[in-house]
Image: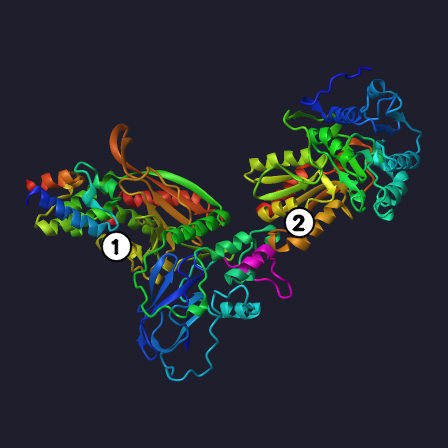
């Protein structure tokens, strides 16, 4: 095991490395912080995010847990209420359903029911999404569900920079914060701007400006949307790509500003369409910006099936750049 | 007519054909078609007006001598 | 009783201001009489009638801004009583400029007003959408609907270019282009001293050109073909012709180009007319719009009527008159409505070739570049010849490149026999 000793804060790195460095930063910065979850220690994490951290920080702060999500999430909530700053990892968001009672009825609710006497400064990291042939129990995108719950913050880092710095802001927040890390993005590489040492967890960001159509997206749909925008640019269509970054609370101002300007909108969301975050955004746009719209809102979401195992079936089930191109072109060109 | 009179006459005629321009400010050697954005119909109207004002019939072959103020003055002095 | 309505003076015109009446109730009018002055974004135009009769009622007030097709006057034609109108006069259409805050007129009323009054004469209709089947609602985007209400446009009558044929913001902006700012009706009719020669506003004309040309490029699938024409014979003919005549009787090469084009159009009428409602409607006569650049910017293309039937001398007089009036003001409304085809010529100082943009709903535009001296092969020998590039831009919905080639060949052929023009 290679135990990283320095603290690489800049340069080119993978999303996985950025997640790991974010955890290291947190562990170094605050003795109240610890990481716990299934296989985070000896195994180094199911997606190798915490590889080497056990050796560097020891078993007191890198804690392997039983396969019992309700128990260890509950323990994390208790620790947070007692003054710790825990980071809990859930191997994949499909498994978070075992801990849903803890997350919703306790973490999200206790600050309210205690009249503000208890804060729950807990961070739960989960892997989310499909695209690596992990089949129907390890590939779903449930972040939109959690964004339904008042009392939670829901973050969806789609860039290496956000993977690197969102955790710090999440830990500083007195509320329970869920971070959804996309399994396909772990291998993505990006260049970090050495001048950036922090990011906010309140705003959406325009990743590519454009005037003809807004593509609202997050997570692993962000690189697909940027690819689509590049293709559209070749056809003379300037698409604006907005990275939502935070699904709860949604940054209405940035979304509304972009769509009011372009007057057309494609929402790309790896969740299922029915009752999804894309549905919420579309509803808000029609509630608040109806008269700015010059075309119907389009949504590119996952097919409403359990994510298939076979590669070609999985590809067909998940949003793809070509669908985004077709939808945006249709809205702009009228076809 | 002396040069100054010829020039004044040409300026008046051009100002009638191309209002909003200032022919008086033209350099003697400047191509009036370029400077005043005069097309072939305008130029024909100018030749007609110049012929009427001076009593001369200007053959088409001589048009090229009328493209500048200096040229017009020289042509009408002959 | 016939209705005299606000004419459409071009594909880009949605409304006009009635600047002045030149007749009164009781005036006798004949076909071709100028009875009113209408101001549009292209300037002031004298409007002539197509009817004979007696004016029985002036329905529009001077200073009123009215949509194309709005009732302006009622004229009793031969055999009718000019006195009291037999039927109660139709309510004048609502003014174009309904303030956004005031309740907009019911859509059905506006539709009825517009639909009932067909503009007189061959009118290049503005972009009207296909009729929507009963019970089905025309798709208009929310943004387009709001903007249309601000502009006083009935968006449901427009052609939709958006998804599923919906009317978009751009469609409404296009329809509204050139209207400029709305005036408050409270100011009252300001036409006691109408300007006969209202100078055109370059900004407004720019917007009008932008609207018409955008519509053209959006709706018309252009194809382009060109050919090089040896102008030696035409030039020789003109030199010989002009050498015997005083300047006021001399010809310019432009009239030869016009006449040759008109004769080629007579041979190939599929280029002379309009694309409307999904099919070609041939023009009634060969009336060629001559593109005239205006000093200070802008462009208009009023018609020379019946070009195929006029002598070169007549055409030269007509051309000089038309260009003079275009630049000085005084183009008649009918001259803007009539072109069945357009010719654009770069003249003797312009570019060597021009690829035109078709003026909708026409189906073709012929461009002539500047004549240049170039080596040319004649009977196997290279000689210097004056050459002109003739370029046809045509609507591929109405014709194909093969027909276009034949058309250009016909133009060339006529120019090789100038004495027969």
Using the image as rendered, state which of residue C399 and residue A168 is in the foreground. Answer: A168
- Residue A51 falls inside the magenta stretch: no
Q: Does dot 2 land on a helix, a strand or a loop?
A: loop
For disc 2, the chain is A
Residue at point 35%, 62% (across, down): C333
Is the magenta region chiefly helix, strand or loop?
Answer: loop
How far apart are labels 1 and 2 at the CA level? Answer: 53 Å
In this image, C393 relative to C383: left or right?
A: right
Q: Is residue A177 left or right of residue C78?
A: right
Q: Quadrant of residue A167?
A: top right
Q: Which residues are magenta?
A: C127-148
Chain bearing tag 1 is C
> Which quadrant is the N terminus of chain C positioned in?
bottom left
Which residue in the protein does label 1 denote?
Answer: C324
Q: Nearer the viewer, residue C94 or A122?
A: A122
Q: How is the image coloured?
A: rainbow
Q: Quadrant of residue C65?
A: bottom left
From the image, tell me which residue sits under label 2: A297
- Label annotation for residue C287: none
The image shows residue C1, relative to residue A32, as above or below, that is below
Q: Is residue C269 visible?
A: no
Q: Is residue A173 visible?
A: yes
Which residue is depicted at the point 55% across and 69% down?
C105
Vertical placement of A57 versus A78: above or below?
Answer: above
Q: Residue at x 51, y 68 (%)?
A: C115
Q: Position of residue C345 (x, y in %)?
A: 32, 45
A239 on left or right of A110: left
Location of residue C372 in the rendering, given as x and y in whole percent from the top left corner? 27, 35
- Say which element carries label 1: helix
């Amino acid at each position: 095991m290679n135990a990283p000793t320095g603290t690489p804060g800049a340069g080119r790195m993978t999303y996985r490395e950025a997640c790991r460095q974010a955890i290291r930063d947190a562990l170094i910065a605050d003795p109240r912080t610890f990481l716990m979850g299934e296989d985070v220690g000896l195994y180094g994490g199911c997606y190798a995010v915490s590889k080497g951290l056990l050796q560097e920080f020891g078993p007191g702060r890198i804690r392997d847990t039983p396969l019992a999500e309700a128990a260890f999430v509950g323990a994390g909530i208790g620790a947070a209420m007692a003054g710790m700053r825990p980071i809990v990892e859930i191997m994949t968001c499909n498994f978070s359903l075992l801990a849903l009672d803890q997350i919703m009825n306790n973490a999200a609710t206790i600050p309210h029911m205690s009249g503000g006497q208890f804060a729950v400064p807990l961070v739960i990291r989960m892997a989310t999404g499909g695209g690596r042939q992990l089949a129907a129990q390890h590939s779903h995108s449930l972040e939109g569900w959690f964004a339904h719950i008042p009392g939670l913050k829901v973050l969806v880092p789609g860039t290496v920079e956000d993977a690197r710095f969102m955790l710090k802001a999440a830990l500083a927040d007195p509320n329970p914060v869920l971070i959804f890390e996309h399994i396909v993005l772990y291998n993505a590489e990006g260049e970090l701007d050495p001048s950036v040492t922090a990011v906010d967890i309140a705003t959406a960001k325009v990743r590519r400006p454009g005037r003809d159509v807004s593509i609202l997206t997050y997570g692993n749909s962000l690189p697909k949307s940027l690819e689509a925008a590049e293709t559209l640019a070749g056809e003379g269509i300037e698409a604006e790509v907005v990275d939502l970054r935070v699904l709860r609370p949604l940054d209405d101002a940035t979304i509304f500003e972009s769509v009011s300007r372009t007057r057309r909108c494609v929402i790309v969301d790896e969740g299922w369409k029915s009752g999804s975050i894309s549905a919420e955004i579309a509803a808000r746009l029609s509630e608040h910006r109806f008269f700015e719209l010059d075309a119907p809102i389009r949504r590119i979401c996952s097919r409403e099936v359990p994510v298939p195992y076979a590669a070609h079936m999985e590809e067909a089930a998940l949003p793809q750049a070509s669908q985004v191109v077709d939808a945006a072109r249709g809205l702009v060109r009228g076809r | 007519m002396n040069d100054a009179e010829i020039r004044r006459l040409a300026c008046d005629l051009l100002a009638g054909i191309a209002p909003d321009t200032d022919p008086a400010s033209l350099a003697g050697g400047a191509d009036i078609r370029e400077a005043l954005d005069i097309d072939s119909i305008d130029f024909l109207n100018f030749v007609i007006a110049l012929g009427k004002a001076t009593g001369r019939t200007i053959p088409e072959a001589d048009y090229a001598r009328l493209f500048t103020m200096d040229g017009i003055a020289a042509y009408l002095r002959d | 009783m016939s209705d005299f309505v606000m004419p459409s003076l071009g594909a880009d015109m949605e409304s006009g201001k009635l600047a002045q009446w030149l007749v009164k109730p009781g005036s006798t009018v004949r076909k071709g009489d100028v009875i009113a002055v209408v101001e549009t974004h292209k300037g002031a135009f004298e409007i002539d009638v197509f009817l004979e009769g007696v004016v029985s009622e002036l329905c529009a007030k001077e200073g009123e801004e009215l949509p194309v097709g709005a009732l302006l006057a009622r004229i009793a034609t031969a055999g009718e009583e000019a006195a009291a109108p037999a039927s109660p006069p139709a309510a004048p259409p609502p003014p174009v400029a309904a303030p956004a805050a005031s309740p907009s007129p019911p859509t059905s009323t506006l539709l009825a007003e517009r639909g009932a009054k067909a503009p007189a004469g061959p009118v290049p209709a503005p972009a009207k959408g296909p009729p929507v089947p009963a019970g089905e609602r025309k798709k208009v985007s929310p943004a387009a609907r709001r903007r249309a209400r601000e502009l006083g446009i009935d968006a449901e009558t427009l052609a939709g270019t958006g998804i599923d044929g919906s009317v978009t913001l751009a469609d409404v902006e296009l329809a509204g282009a050139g209207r400029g700012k709305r005036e408050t009706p409270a100011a009252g009719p300001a036409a006691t001293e109408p300007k006969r020669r209202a100078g055109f506003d370059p900004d407004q004309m720019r917007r009008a050109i932008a609207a018409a040309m955008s519509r053209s490029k959006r709706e018309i699938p252009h194809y382009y073909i060109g050919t090089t024409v040896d102008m030696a014979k035409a030039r020789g003919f003109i030199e010989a012709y002009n050498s015997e005549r005083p300047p006021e009787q001399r010809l310019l090469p432009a009239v030869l180009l016009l006449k040759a084009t008109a004769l080629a159009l007579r041979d190939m009428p599929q280029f002379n007319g309009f694309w409307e409602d999904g099919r070609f409607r041939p023009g009634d006569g060969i009336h060629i719009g001559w593109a005239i650049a205006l000093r200070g910017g802008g462009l208009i293309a009023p018609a020379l009527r019946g070009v195929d039937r006029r002598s070169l001398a007549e055409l030269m007089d007509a051309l000089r008159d038309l260009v003079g009036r275009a630049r000085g003001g005084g183009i008649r409304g009918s001259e803007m409505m009539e072109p069945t085809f357009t010719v654009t010529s770069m003249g003797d100082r312009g570019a060597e070739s021009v690829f035109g943009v078709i003026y909708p709903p026409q189906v073709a535009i012929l461009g002539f570049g500047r004549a240049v001296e170039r080596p040319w092969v004649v009977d196997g020998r290279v000689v210097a010849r004056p050459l002109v590039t003739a370029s046809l831009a045509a609507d591929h919905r109405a014709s194909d490149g093969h027909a276009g080639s034949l058309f250009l060949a016909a133009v060339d052929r006529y120019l090789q026999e100038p004495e027969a023009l």
